[in-house]
Image (cartoon, coloured by chain):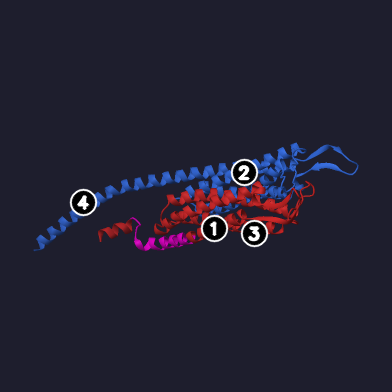
Amino acid sequence: MDSKESENIAVTDAKAAAKGKAAEGAHPTADVAMKTKTQTRRGSKKGLAIVDLVLRLGASSAAVAAAYSPLSSEQILPFFTQFLQFHAEYNDLPTFTFFVVANAIAVGYIGLSMPFSIVCIIRPRAIGPRLLLVFCDTVMIALVVAAAGASSAIMYLAHNGNLDSNWLAICMQYTNFCQGLSGAVVASFVAAVFFMLLVVNSTFALKK
Amino acid sequence: MKGAAAAIELGESKIGSTPRSGVNRGAAILDFILRIIAFLGTLVSAIAMGTTRERLPFFTQFLQFRAEYNDLPTFTFFVVANSIVCAYLMFSLALSIFHIIRSNAKNSRIILIFFDTGMLALLTAGASAATAIVYLAHKGNAKANWFPICQQFNSFCERISGSLIGSFVAIVIFVLLILMSAAALSRR
Protein backbone atom coordinates (compact mmCIF):
# COMPACT_ATOMS: atom_id res chain seq x y z
CA MET A 1 0.00 0.00 0.00
CA ASP A 2 2.77 2.34 0.99
CA SER A 3 4.86 1.54 -2.03
CA LYS A 4 1.86 2.03 -4.31
CA GLU A 5 1.09 5.36 -2.69
CA SER A 6 4.67 6.53 -2.94
CA GLU A 7 4.79 5.46 -6.57
CA ASN A 8 1.60 7.40 -7.24
CA ILE A 9 3.00 10.52 -5.58
CA ALA A 10 6.22 10.20 -7.55
CA VAL A 11 4.31 9.97 -10.83
CA THR A 12 2.19 13.01 -9.89
CA ASP A 13 5.32 14.96 -8.95
CA ALA A 14 6.95 14.03 -12.21
CA LYS A 15 3.87 15.20 -14.11
CA ALA A 16 3.81 18.43 -12.15
CA ALA A 17 7.50 18.95 -12.78
CA ALA A 18 7.00 18.39 -16.49
CA LYS A 19 4.11 20.84 -16.47
CA GLY A 20 6.21 23.34 -14.58
CA LYS A 21 9.03 22.97 -17.06
CA ALA A 22 6.65 23.53 -19.92
CA ALA A 23 5.23 26.57 -18.24
CA GLU A 24 8.70 27.85 -17.49
CA GLY A 25 9.62 27.34 -21.10
CA ALA A 26 6.56 29.25 -22.24
CA HIS A 27 7.01 32.18 -19.86
CA PRO A 28 10.17 33.76 -21.31
CA THR A 29 8.60 33.86 -24.78
CA ALA A 30 5.51 35.62 -23.44
CA ASP A 31 7.74 37.95 -21.44
CA VAL A 32 9.77 38.86 -24.52
CA ALA A 33 6.60 39.46 -26.52
CA MET A 34 5.18 41.70 -23.77
CA LYS A 35 8.48 43.57 -23.44
CA THR A 36 8.73 44.14 -27.20
CA LYS A 37 5.15 45.41 -27.33
CA THR A 38 5.75 47.76 -24.39
CA GLN A 39 9.00 49.04 -25.90
CA THR A 40 7.33 49.64 -29.28
CA ARG A 41 4.49 51.53 -27.62
CA ARG A 42 6.93 53.48 -25.51
CA GLY A 43 8.97 54.33 -28.61
CA SER A 44 5.92 55.57 -30.50
CA LYS A 45 4.87 57.67 -27.50
CA LYS A 46 8.36 59.14 -27.31
CA GLY A 47 8.12 59.95 -31.02
CA LEU A 48 4.79 61.71 -30.47
CA ALA A 49 6.31 63.66 -27.57
CA ILE A 50 9.15 64.85 -29.84
CA VAL A 51 6.60 65.85 -32.50
CA ASP A 52 4.78 67.77 -29.73
CA LEU A 53 7.93 69.75 -28.95
CA VAL A 54 8.54 70.52 -32.64
CA LEU A 55 4.91 71.68 -33.08
CA ARG A 56 5.28 73.91 -30.02
CA LEU A 57 8.33 75.55 -31.56
CA GLY A 58 6.36 76.10 -34.79
CA ALA A 59 3.40 77.59 -32.91
CA SER A 60 5.78 79.78 -30.93
CA SER A 61 7.43 81.25 -34.02
CA ALA A 62 4.05 81.91 -35.69
CA ALA A 63 2.65 83.55 -32.54
CA VAL A 64 5.78 85.70 -32.11
CA ALA A 65 5.44 86.89 -35.72
CA ALA A 66 1.73 87.61 -35.17
CA ALA A 67 2.38 89.56 -31.95
CA TYR A 68 5.36 91.54 -33.24
CA SER A 69 4.11 92.43 -36.73
CA PRO A 70 1.33 94.88 -35.66
CA LEU A 71 3.72 96.60 -33.23
CA SER A 72 6.06 97.46 -36.07
CA SER A 73 3.44 98.34 -38.68
CA GLU A 74 2.60 102.00 -38.32
CA GLN A 75 2.26 104.44 -41.18
CA ILE A 76 2.34 108.23 -41.44
CA LEU A 77 0.93 109.68 -44.65
CA PRO A 78 3.23 112.15 -46.44
CA PHE A 79 0.67 115.00 -46.36
CA PHE A 80 -0.64 116.89 -43.32
CA THR A 81 -2.50 120.05 -42.33
CA GLN A 82 -1.69 122.65 -39.68
CA PHE A 83 -3.53 120.68 -36.99
CA LEU A 84 -3.75 117.14 -38.35
CA GLN A 85 -1.22 114.47 -39.16
CA PHE A 86 -2.51 111.30 -40.84
CA HIS A 87 -1.00 108.55 -38.77
CA ALA A 88 -2.14 104.93 -38.33
CA GLU A 89 -1.10 102.60 -35.49
CA TYR A 90 -2.33 99.18 -34.44
CA ASN A 91 -3.81 100.52 -31.17
CA ASP A 92 -6.11 102.89 -33.05
CA LEU A 93 -8.30 99.80 -33.37
CA PRO A 94 -9.13 98.11 -30.01
CA THR A 95 -9.48 94.74 -31.76
CA PHE A 96 -5.80 94.81 -32.66
CA THR A 97 -4.83 95.61 -29.08
CA PHE A 98 -6.69 92.42 -28.12
CA PHE A 99 -4.97 90.63 -31.01
CA VAL A 100 -1.47 91.58 -29.81
CA VAL A 101 -2.28 90.71 -26.18
CA ALA A 102 -3.79 87.32 -27.14
CA ASN A 103 -0.78 86.36 -29.24
CA ALA A 104 1.61 87.54 -26.53
CA ILE A 105 -0.26 85.31 -24.04
CA ALA A 106 0.07 82.41 -26.49
CA VAL A 107 3.84 82.99 -26.75
CA GLY A 108 4.14 83.14 -22.95
CA TYR A 109 2.10 79.96 -22.58
CA ILE A 110 4.26 78.08 -25.09
CA GLY A 111 7.34 79.13 -23.14
CA LEU A 112 5.80 77.79 -19.93
CA SER A 113 4.57 74.58 -21.56
CA MET A 114 7.98 73.62 -22.99
CA PRO A 115 9.18 71.97 -19.73
CA PHE A 116 6.02 69.82 -19.65
CA SER A 117 6.65 68.81 -23.25
CA ILE A 118 10.22 67.82 -22.33
CA VAL A 119 8.88 65.82 -19.35
CA CYS A 120 6.66 63.93 -21.82
CA ILE A 121 9.77 63.05 -23.89
CA ILE A 122 11.66 61.80 -20.82
CA ARG A 123 8.62 59.98 -19.38
CA PRO A 124 6.48 58.99 -22.38
CA ARG A 125 3.89 57.16 -20.28
CA ALA A 126 3.13 60.14 -18.00
CA ILE A 127 -0.56 61.02 -18.29
CA GLY A 128 -0.92 64.03 -15.95
CA PRO A 129 1.26 66.47 -17.92
CA ARG A 130 -0.35 65.42 -21.20
CA LEU A 131 -3.88 65.99 -19.92
CA LEU A 132 -2.86 69.39 -18.59
CA LEU A 133 -1.34 70.27 -21.98
CA VAL A 134 -4.46 69.11 -23.86
CA PHE A 135 -6.66 71.34 -21.71
CA CYS A 136 -4.41 74.40 -21.97
CA ASP A 137 -3.83 73.87 -25.71
CA THR A 138 -7.60 73.77 -26.26
CA VAL A 139 -8.04 77.04 -24.36
CA MET A 140 -5.23 78.53 -26.46
CA ILE A 141 -6.97 77.45 -29.67
CA ALA A 142 -10.04 79.37 -28.52
CA LEU A 143 -8.00 82.45 -27.55
CA VAL A 144 -5.82 82.61 -30.67
CA VAL A 145 -8.68 81.86 -33.09
CA ALA A 146 -10.85 84.48 -31.33
CA ALA A 147 -8.13 87.09 -31.79
CA ALA A 148 -7.47 86.09 -35.39
CA GLY A 149 -11.19 85.95 -36.24
CA ALA A 150 -11.97 89.35 -34.74
CA SER A 151 -8.96 90.93 -36.43
CA SER A 152 -9.76 89.39 -39.80
CA ALA A 153 -13.29 90.85 -39.58
CA ILE A 154 -11.83 94.31 -38.97
CA MET A 155 -9.23 93.83 -41.72
CA TYR A 156 -11.96 92.83 -44.17
CA LEU A 157 -13.78 96.02 -43.26
CA ALA A 158 -10.60 98.09 -43.61
CA HIS A 159 -9.98 96.63 -47.07
CA ASN A 160 -13.52 96.65 -48.47
CA GLY A 161 -15.52 98.99 -46.24
CA ASN A 162 -19.31 98.67 -45.95
CA LEU A 163 -21.64 100.91 -47.94
CA ASP A 164 -24.78 99.97 -46.00
CA SER A 165 -23.36 101.28 -42.73
CA ASN A 166 -21.22 104.05 -44.27
CA TRP A 167 -17.94 102.54 -43.08
CA LEU A 168 -15.29 103.51 -45.61
CA ALA A 169 -12.28 101.40 -46.61
CA ILE A 170 -9.16 102.88 -45.00
CA CYS A 171 -6.68 100.61 -46.77
CA MET A 172 -6.75 102.76 -49.90
CA GLN A 173 -4.76 105.34 -47.93
CA TYR A 174 -2.81 103.22 -45.44
CA THR A 175 -1.56 100.45 -47.74
CA ASN A 176 1.62 99.48 -45.83
CA PHE A 177 -0.21 99.51 -42.51
CA CYS A 178 -2.90 97.19 -43.86
CA GLN A 179 -0.34 94.83 -45.40
CA GLY A 180 1.47 94.48 -42.09
CA LEU A 181 -1.73 93.75 -40.20
CA SER A 182 -2.96 91.25 -42.81
CA GLY A 183 0.32 89.36 -42.50
CA ALA A 184 -0.08 89.28 -38.72
CA VAL A 185 -3.60 87.83 -39.03
CA VAL A 186 -2.31 85.08 -41.35
CA ALA A 187 0.50 84.26 -38.89
CA SER A 188 -2.07 84.04 -36.09
CA PHE A 189 -4.18 81.55 -38.05
CA VAL A 190 -1.02 79.49 -38.68
CA ALA A 191 -0.38 79.47 -34.91
CA ALA A 192 -3.98 78.30 -34.37
CA VAL A 193 -3.45 75.42 -36.82
CA PHE A 194 -0.31 74.41 -34.88
CA PHE A 195 -2.31 74.40 -31.65
CA MET A 196 -4.98 72.21 -33.27
CA LEU A 197 -2.30 69.76 -34.39
CA LEU A 198 -0.93 69.76 -30.84
CA VAL A 199 -4.31 68.71 -29.43
CA VAL A 200 -4.71 65.92 -31.99
CA ASN A 201 -1.11 64.76 -31.39
CA SER A 202 -1.65 64.66 -27.61
CA THR A 203 -4.87 62.71 -28.15
CA PHE A 204 -2.99 60.01 -30.05
CA ALA A 205 -0.37 59.92 -27.30
CA LEU A 206 -3.06 59.51 -24.62
CA LYS A 207 -4.55 56.52 -26.42
CA LYS A 208 -3.34 53.41 -24.61
CA MET B 1 -11.77 27.90 -12.17
CA LYS B 2 -8.80 27.72 -14.51
CA GLY B 3 -10.36 30.42 -16.71
CA ALA B 4 -10.88 32.71 -13.74
CA ALA B 5 -7.30 32.24 -12.62
CA ALA B 6 -6.05 33.01 -16.11
CA ALA B 7 -8.22 36.09 -16.27
CA ILE B 8 -6.87 37.35 -12.94
CA GLU B 9 -3.31 36.59 -14.08
CA LEU B 10 -3.84 38.64 -17.24
CA GLY B 11 -5.39 41.50 -15.28
CA GLU B 12 -8.85 41.12 -16.77
CA SER B 13 -10.82 40.56 -13.59
CA LYS B 14 -14.28 42.12 -13.77
CA ILE B 15 -13.97 43.63 -10.31
CA GLY B 16 -11.14 45.93 -11.44
CA SER B 17 -12.67 47.06 -14.72
CA THR B 18 -16.23 47.83 -13.60
CA PRO B 19 -15.56 51.15 -11.80
CA ARG B 20 -13.53 52.46 -14.75
CA SER B 21 -16.30 51.45 -17.14
CA GLY B 22 -18.83 53.16 -14.88
CA VAL B 23 -16.85 56.40 -14.83
CA ASN B 24 -16.49 56.29 -18.63
CA ARG B 25 -20.22 55.67 -19.03
CA GLY B 26 -21.00 58.60 -16.72
CA ALA B 27 -18.66 60.81 -18.75
CA ALA B 28 -20.33 59.62 -21.97
CA ILE B 29 -23.77 60.55 -20.61
CA LEU B 30 -22.48 64.00 -19.59
CA ASP B 31 -20.93 64.32 -23.07
CA PHE B 32 -24.34 63.60 -24.62
CA ILE B 33 -26.09 66.20 -22.44
CA LEU B 34 -23.44 68.86 -23.18
CA ARG B 35 -23.76 68.17 -26.91
CA ILE B 36 -27.51 68.75 -26.74
CA ILE B 37 -26.97 72.07 -24.90
CA ALA B 38 -24.34 73.16 -27.46
CA PHE B 39 -26.67 72.11 -30.29
CA LEU B 40 -29.46 74.27 -28.87
CA GLY B 41 -27.05 77.17 -28.29
CA THR B 42 -25.78 77.23 -31.87
CA LEU B 43 -29.28 76.68 -33.28
CA VAL B 44 -30.72 79.60 -31.29
CA SER B 45 -27.75 81.80 -32.29
CA ALA B 46 -28.14 81.03 -35.98
CA ILE B 47 -31.91 81.61 -35.91
CA ALA B 48 -31.66 84.80 -33.82
CA MET B 49 -29.06 86.32 -36.15
CA GLY B 50 -30.71 85.07 -39.34
CA THR B 51 -34.12 86.54 -38.52
CA THR B 52 -32.82 89.96 -37.39
CA ARG B 53 -34.09 92.96 -39.31
CA GLU B 54 -35.21 96.49 -38.48
CA ARG B 55 -36.90 99.17 -40.55
CA LEU B 56 -36.72 102.76 -39.34
CA PRO B 57 -40.07 104.62 -39.24
CA PHE B 58 -38.87 107.49 -41.47
CA PHE B 59 -37.92 107.37 -45.16
CA THR B 60 -37.32 109.61 -48.18
CA GLN B 61 -38.67 109.36 -51.72
CA PHE B 62 -35.79 107.10 -52.80
CA LEU B 63 -34.40 105.72 -49.55
CA GLN B 64 -35.75 103.42 -46.91
CA PHE B 65 -33.63 102.89 -43.77
CA ARG B 66 -33.50 99.17 -43.19
CA ALA B 67 -30.96 96.90 -41.47
CA GLU B 68 -30.59 93.16 -42.03
CA TYR B 69 -27.97 90.67 -40.84
CA ASN B 70 -26.68 90.07 -44.38
CA ASP B 71 -25.82 93.74 -44.86
CA LEU B 72 -22.57 92.80 -43.10
CA PRO B 73 -20.71 89.77 -44.54
CA THR B 74 -19.33 88.91 -41.09
CA PHE B 75 -22.83 88.18 -39.83
CA THR B 76 -23.47 85.95 -42.83
CA PHE B 77 -20.32 84.02 -41.90
CA PHE B 78 -21.55 83.84 -38.31
CA VAL B 79 -24.87 82.30 -39.38
CA VAL B 80 -23.15 79.82 -41.73
CA ALA B 81 -20.58 78.80 -39.08
CA ASN B 82 -23.28 78.27 -36.46
CA SER B 83 -25.38 76.25 -38.90
CA ILE B 84 -22.43 73.99 -39.78
CA VAL B 85 -21.57 73.42 -36.11
CA CYS B 86 -25.23 72.83 -35.28
CA ALA B 87 -25.50 70.16 -38.02
CA TYR B 88 -22.24 68.55 -36.85
CA LEU B 89 -23.49 68.40 -33.26
CA MET B 90 -26.68 66.70 -34.42
CA PHE B 91 -24.69 64.02 -36.27
CA SER B 92 -22.20 63.62 -33.41
CA LEU B 93 -25.01 62.70 -31.02
CA ALA B 94 -25.02 59.26 -32.65
CA LEU B 95 -21.36 58.71 -31.72
CA SER B 96 -22.08 60.03 -28.25
CA ILE B 97 -24.84 57.41 -27.81
CA PHE B 98 -22.40 54.76 -29.08
CA HIS B 99 -19.97 55.82 -26.32
CA ILE B 100 -22.70 55.39 -23.70
CA ILE B 101 -23.29 51.83 -24.94
CA ARG B 102 -19.60 50.97 -25.45
CA SER B 103 -17.77 53.11 -22.92
CA ASN B 104 -14.32 51.65 -23.68
CA ALA B 105 -14.30 52.63 -27.38
CA LYS B 106 -11.06 54.37 -28.34
CA ASN B 107 -10.86 55.11 -32.08
CA SER B 108 -14.28 56.75 -32.25
CA ARG B 109 -13.25 59.05 -29.40
CA ILE B 110 -10.16 60.14 -31.34
CA ILE B 111 -12.34 60.91 -34.38
CA LEU B 112 -14.68 62.91 -32.15
CA ILE B 113 -11.82 64.92 -30.60
CA PHE B 114 -10.43 65.66 -34.07
CA PHE B 115 -13.73 67.04 -35.37
CA ASP B 116 -14.58 68.77 -32.08
CA THR B 117 -11.30 70.69 -32.33
CA GLY B 118 -12.09 71.76 -35.90
CA MET B 119 -15.60 72.83 -34.96
CA LEU B 120 -14.30 74.73 -31.93
CA ALA B 121 -12.02 76.72 -34.24
CA LEU B 122 -14.81 77.41 -36.76
CA LEU B 123 -17.31 78.48 -34.11
CA THR B 124 -14.78 80.67 -32.28
CA ALA B 125 -13.79 82.38 -35.54
CA GLY B 126 -17.43 83.10 -36.39
CA ALA B 127 -18.39 84.30 -32.92
CA SER B 128 -15.32 86.51 -32.44
CA ALA B 129 -15.61 88.07 -35.90
CA ALA B 130 -19.25 88.90 -35.23
CA THR B 131 -18.33 90.27 -31.79
CA ALA B 132 -15.76 92.62 -33.33
CA ILE B 133 -18.38 94.02 -35.71
CA VAL B 134 -21.01 94.31 -32.96
CA TYR B 135 -18.49 96.24 -30.85
CA LEU B 136 -17.86 98.54 -33.82
CA ALA B 137 -21.61 99.00 -34.37
CA HIS B 138 -22.02 100.01 -30.72
CA LYS B 139 -18.94 102.19 -30.24
CA GLY B 140 -17.74 103.07 -33.73
CA ASN B 141 -14.15 104.22 -34.37
CA ALA B 142 -13.48 107.94 -34.63
CA LYS B 143 -9.95 107.50 -36.02
CA ALA B 144 -11.14 105.39 -38.94
CA ASN B 145 -14.30 107.47 -39.41
CA TRP B 146 -16.53 104.48 -38.71
CA PHE B 147 -19.62 105.79 -36.94
CA PRO B 148 -21.75 103.72 -34.54
CA ILE B 149 -24.95 102.55 -36.23
CA CYS B 150 -26.60 101.33 -33.03
CA GLN B 151 -27.85 104.81 -32.19
CA GLN B 152 -30.31 104.43 -35.08
CA PHE B 153 -30.90 100.68 -35.27
CA ASN B 154 -31.54 99.96 -31.62
CA SER B 155 -33.47 96.69 -31.62
CA PHE B 156 -31.30 95.33 -34.46
CA CYS B 157 -28.20 95.81 -32.31
CA GLU B 158 -29.83 94.30 -29.23
CA ARG B 159 -30.80 91.22 -31.20
CA ILE B 160 -27.38 90.65 -32.80
CA SER B 161 -25.68 91.16 -29.43
CA GLY B 162 -27.97 88.58 -27.83
CA SER B 163 -27.35 86.05 -30.59
CA LEU B 164 -23.65 85.94 -29.67
CA ILE B 165 -24.38 84.48 -26.22
CA GLY B 166 -25.46 81.05 -27.47
CA SER B 167 -22.32 80.80 -29.57
CA PHE B 168 -20.00 81.58 -26.68
CA VAL B 169 -21.81 79.04 -24.48
CA ALA B 170 -21.22 76.44 -27.20
CA ILE B 171 -17.51 77.39 -27.34
CA VAL B 172 -17.11 76.75 -23.60
CA ILE B 173 -18.94 73.42 -23.99
CA PHE B 174 -16.61 72.37 -26.84
CA VAL B 175 -13.57 73.03 -24.63
CA LEU B 176 -15.13 70.82 -21.92
CA LEU B 177 -16.03 68.11 -24.46
CA ILE B 178 -12.46 67.90 -25.74
CA LEU B 179 -11.09 67.70 -22.20
CA MET B 180 -13.60 65.00 -21.22
CA SER B 181 -12.82 62.89 -24.28
CA ALA B 182 -9.09 63.20 -23.62
CA ALA B 183 -9.61 62.17 -19.99
CA ALA B 184 -11.70 59.17 -21.08
CA LEU B 185 -8.93 58.11 -23.48
CA SER B 186 -6.24 58.35 -20.82
CA ARG B 187 -8.14 56.39 -18.19
CA ARG B 188 -6.30 53.11 -17.61
Q: Chain of mark 1?
A: B
Q: What element does badge 4 sit on?
A: helix
List the residue tagged with mark 2. A189
Neighbours of disc 4 within 10 Å: few (<14), some (14-19), many (20+):
few
Q: Chain of mark 4?
A: A
- For the residues marked 2 and 3, what is the alpha-carbon distance in whole angstroms? 27 Å
Amino acid type for the residue under numbered disc 1:
Ala
Q: Which mark is residue A18?
A: 4
The range drawn in magenta is B10-30
**Badge 1 and badge 3 both on one subunit:** yes
Q: Which mark is residue B38?
A: 1
Amino acid type for the residue under numbered disc 2:
Phe
- Residue at horizontal 43%, vertical 49%? B107
Answer whether residue A40 is visible to the viewer in this image: yes
Answer whether residue A69 is visible to the viewer in this image: no
- For the residues marked 4 and 2, what is the alpha-carbon distance in whole angstroms? 68 Å
Amino acid type for the residue under numbered disc 3:
Gly
Q: What element does badge 2 sit on?
A: helix
Q: Position of residue B47 (x, y in %)?
A: 58, 56
User: Which of the chains is red?
Assistant: B
Q: What element does badge 1 sit on?
A: helix
Q: How many marks?
A: 4
First-in-chain label (1 vs 3) = 1
Q: Colour of chain A?
A: blue
List the residue tagged with mark 3. B162
- Residue at horizontal 55%, vertical 51%? B83
